[in-house]
Image (cartoon, coloured by chain):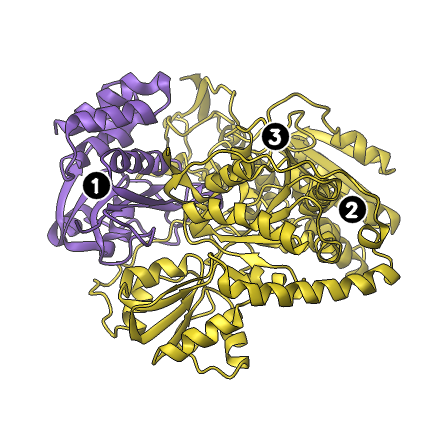
């Protein structure tokens, strides 16, 4: 059989293909994005980008009710957006199997919090499977569809950043085509009015109890008996660290992490002298095991924060910390906006006008830190507009005269649009800036409802953001080139004085979007340079200050966006052909 | 065999992902079990990035931890120093002698350290490569990372032919010739 090195996310896409999935819907979110991008290669699967995760889960739900296998993918915080349909789909159950892939981010490589999806699974009474490598990512995903149909439940496949973005060898298999399930009208199951839901709640409880019993014999829950002086219960990527450090120890590796196989755990615990639970983030397994009166160690040894490691086990279990030199104290290198990024241009104007921004989720969150220092708040997708509104209602119109909300085009269509409706409806004052760079940037350039292209790359209708906002009844809507700093300054100043909602759409494509050509570069003229440093202020990484106070521009990085030229009052930077 | 641990570090956008994929494919074509761990998303935007490649008979964890790296390939000086404590006492550092100021240096919050190369050389077996210079000479500045890889190739147990085969199959088709030229330039250093 063919073997291939695959990213965890790539393996999940392959699993979808092999499992006979027909419909997938998702909103991009690191570390889950590459699943949908890899589904594109399989013509048998209809795969799409939805404007947000709630929509994606509802699309998958409809597909399942109609009788086909369906899926939706999201990052952990996306599951919060999708919680509403999911928690009721838990009652409805499935016709065709339905599995969500939810990617957690221990260590917060690209996220605003570190929540544990297993907890959401427990509260929604939804079973959760968790793989430990790329091969299992594919196999468990397929198995989850079988469980989904057998127990009449939506399922969650939980991954983490480390699993989603690690590559390992995967054995490929053929696609199975599940039997076509004809649609049947069944309001007792598919219409969740109280009378029906009350009955379905009983089913939900029974299903979880049945599953917990059956889980003792499921192949994804695996006992590896070895040295019985210590036994680990572990799951996900943490299992790999146990195998790395204590290959001789006894291990109960849980593939189904909700519900737990109580009998199997009791049995395993009785055979080992010391029981250690090794699970990243929350003590989900540990608290349940302790509640059954089984003595074990867990979070007193290992943190609830960040990623786990083999060195952590070497220290806590073997008492043999790895011999490691002190880490050198060196300057931090946080991520920054790219050279030629249109956000930098808009932020340099806001910074000059000393305006605070209620921020949102995207590359432009980086505007919070020096030297731009414009963004004051970031909560979640879409929150910039609604939190600005909250400030105005709390502190009055004058308070927000030097505030704006900033939000990207993709984030605006995700949930920002609701917040803007709320401003209009509730007679708000405030300026909203939509940083329209024609893509979902931070997650790696995915299309969305306003780009004119589908996930599969086909041309499609593009939502016109300007007209959409106009249709809400907002009179003052302006589209401005993101690099026209003079015009931006004039319009922002004017709109800040207005006692109603206004929207400024700053337009310029993300500099990393493919298909663009940058034939020019900016060149400093040192004889004209007055060494004032104005060009350096927005922190473009292509610019460096020389020892004598003049500047250099790295031509391999420069895209000739011209922001530094506009900031130079002395004509000491010019554009030239590369 | 024991597992070989390789780290590739640099600044987001320098091509650590491509490099780790070449190394991963090389190991799997040679018949090893292999795991690669990457960084996607926000950290890629000009920040410090690190990828891991581990290969051997059977590989469990996908990352390389402090004190465990056999080879550290660094595309930038400061990044080599940042991750130096990950390298085994008898491990090797291949460092591209390039300076890229992090934003903390640009804004004056920190200073770019002096004498980085000397510091690294005093602690670990080190190969210093001026890859950008070489890449510019062959007219392909973007291939500097493959020059570094060529220089690193000698610290690993694959044949020159194995490397060439995998590079051909991994880089974008239009760039094969330039990348092979870059590899040869690094390999002959």
Q: Residues within 10 Å of mark 3 (few under 14, many from 20)?
A: many
Indicate the position of residue A442 as horizontal and vertical percent values: 54, 40
Indicate the position of residue A365 as horizontal and vertical percent values: 57, 48
| Residue placed under numbered mark 3 in the picture | A455
- Residue A333 shown left or right of residue A358 in the figure: left
CA distance for labels 2 and 1: 50 Å
- Residue A333 shown left or right of residue B115 in the figure: right
Confirm or deny contact between disc 1 and disc 3 (CB under 8 A). no
Helix or strand or loop: what does disc 2 sit on? helix
Q: Residues within 10 Å of mark 1 (few under 14, many from 20)?
A: many
Name the residue at 37% across, 30% down: A554
| Front in this rendered view, residue A374 or A195 | A195
What number is the disc on residue B189? none
Indicate the position of residue A143 as horizontal and vertical percent values: 53, 49
Name the residue at 51% across, 80% down: A290
Question: Mark 1 belongs to which subunit?
Answer: B
**Residue B36 sits in which quadrant?**
top left
| Residue placed under numbered mark 1 in the picture | B95
| Front in this rendered view, residue B68 or B24 | B24
CA distance for labels 3 and 2: 24 Å
| Residue placed under numbered mark 2 in the picture | A418
Give the label, 1 or 3, closer to the camera.
3
Q: Is residue A380 visible?
A: no
Give the label, 3 or 2, closer to the camera.
3
Q: Is residue A420 visible?
A: yes
Up-down: is B90 above or below A461? Answer: below
Up-down: is A401 above or below A250? Answer: above
Write down the colour of chain B.
purple
Helix or strand or loop: what does disc 3 sit on? loop
Write down the colour of chain A.
yellow
């Amino acid at each position: 059989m063919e073997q291939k090195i695959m990213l965890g996310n790539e393996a999940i896409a392959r699993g979808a293909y092999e499992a006979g999935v027909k419909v997938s819907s998702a909103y991009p979110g690191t570390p889950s994005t590459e699943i949908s991008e890899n589904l594109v290669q399989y013509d048998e699967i209809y795969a799409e980008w939805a404007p947000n995760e709630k929509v994606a889960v509802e699309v998958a739900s409809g597909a399942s009710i109609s009788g086909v296998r369906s899926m939706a993918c999201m990052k952990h915080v996306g599951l919060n957006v999708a919680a509403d349909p999911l928690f009721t789909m838990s009652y409805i159950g499935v016709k065709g199997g339905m599995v969500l892939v939810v990617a957690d981010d221990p260590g917060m490589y690209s996220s605003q919090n570190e929540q544990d999806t297993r907890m959401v699974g427990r509260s929604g009474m939804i079973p959760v499977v968790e793989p430990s490598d790329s091969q299992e990512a594919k196999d468990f995903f397929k198995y989850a569809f079988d469980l989904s149909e057998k127990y009449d439940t939506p399922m969650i496949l939980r991954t983490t950043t480390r699993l989603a973005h690690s590559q390992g060898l995967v054995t490929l298999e053929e696609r199975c085509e599940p039997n076509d399930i004809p649609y049947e009208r069944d309001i007792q199951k598919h219409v969740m009015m109280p009378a029906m839901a009350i009955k379905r709640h009983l089913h939900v409880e029974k299903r979880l109890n049945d599953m917990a019993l059956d889980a003792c014999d499921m192949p994804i829950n695996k006992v590896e008996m070895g040295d019985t002086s210590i036994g680990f219960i572990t799951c996900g990527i943490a299992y790999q660290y146990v195998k790395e450090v204590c290959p001789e120890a006894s291990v109960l590796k849980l593939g189904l992490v909700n519900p737990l196989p109580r009998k199997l755990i009791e049995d395993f615990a009785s055979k080992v002298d010391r029981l250690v639970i090794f699970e990243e983030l929350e003590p989900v397994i540990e608290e349940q095991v302790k509640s059954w009166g089984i003595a074990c160690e867990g979070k007193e040894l290992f943190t609830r924060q960040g990623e786990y490691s083999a060195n952590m086990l070497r220290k806590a279990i073997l008492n043999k910390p790895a011999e490691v030199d002190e880490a050198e104290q060196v300057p931090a290198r946080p991520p920054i906006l790219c050279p030629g990024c249109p956000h930098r241009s808009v932020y340099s104007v806001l910074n000059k006008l000393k305006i605070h921004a209620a921020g949102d989720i995207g590359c432009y969150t980086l505007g919070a830190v020096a030297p731009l220092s414009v963004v004051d708040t970031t909560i979640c997708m879409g929150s910039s507009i609604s939190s600005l509104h909250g400030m105005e209602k709390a502190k009055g119109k004058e308070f927000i005269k030097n505030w704006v909300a900033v939000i990207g085009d993709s984030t605006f269509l995700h949930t920002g649009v609701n917040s803007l409706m709320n401003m209009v409806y509730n007679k708000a004052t405030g300026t909203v800036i939509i940083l329209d760079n024609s893509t979902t940037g931070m997650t790696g350039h995915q299309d969305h409802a306003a780009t004119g292209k589908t996930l599969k790359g086909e041309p499609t209708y593009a939502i016109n953001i300007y007209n959409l906002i106009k249709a809400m009844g907002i009179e003052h809507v302006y589209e401005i080139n993101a690099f026209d700093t003079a015009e931006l300054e004039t319009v922002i100043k004017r709109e800040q004085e207005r006692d109603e909602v206004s929207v400024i759409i700053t337009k310029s494509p993300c500099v990393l979007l493919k298909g663009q050509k940058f034939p020019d570069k900016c060149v400093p003229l040192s004889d004209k340079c007055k060494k004032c440093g104005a060009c350096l202020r927005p922190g473009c990484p292509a610019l460096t200050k020389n020892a004598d106070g003049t500047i250099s521009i790295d031509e391999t990085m420069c895209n000739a966006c011209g922001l530094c030229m506009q900031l130079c009052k002395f004509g000491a930077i010019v554009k030239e052909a590369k | 065999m024991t597992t070989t641990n390789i780290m590739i570090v640099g600044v987001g956008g320098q091509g650590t992902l491509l490099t780790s994929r070449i190394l991963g494919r090389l190991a799997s074509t040679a018949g090893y079990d292999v795991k690669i761990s990457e960084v996607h998303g926000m950290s890629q935007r000009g920040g410090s990035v690190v990828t891991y490649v581990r290969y051997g008979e059977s590989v469990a964890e996908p990352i390389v931890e402090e004190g465990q790296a056999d080879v550290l390939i660094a595309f930038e000086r400061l990044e080599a120093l940042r991750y130096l404590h990950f390298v085994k006492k008898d491990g090797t550092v291949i460092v591209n002698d390039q300076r890229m100021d992090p934003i903390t240096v640009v804004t004056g919050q920190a200073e770019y350290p002096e004498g980085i190369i000397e510091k690294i050389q005093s602690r670990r077996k080190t190969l210093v490569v001026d890859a950008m210079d070489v890449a510019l000479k062959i007219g392909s500045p973007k291939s500097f990372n493959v020059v570094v890889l060529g220089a690193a190739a000698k610290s690993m147990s694959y044949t020159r032919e194995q490397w060439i085969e995998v590079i051909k199959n991994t880089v974008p088709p239009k760039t094969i010739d330039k990348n092979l030229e870059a590899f040869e330039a690094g390999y002959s250093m």
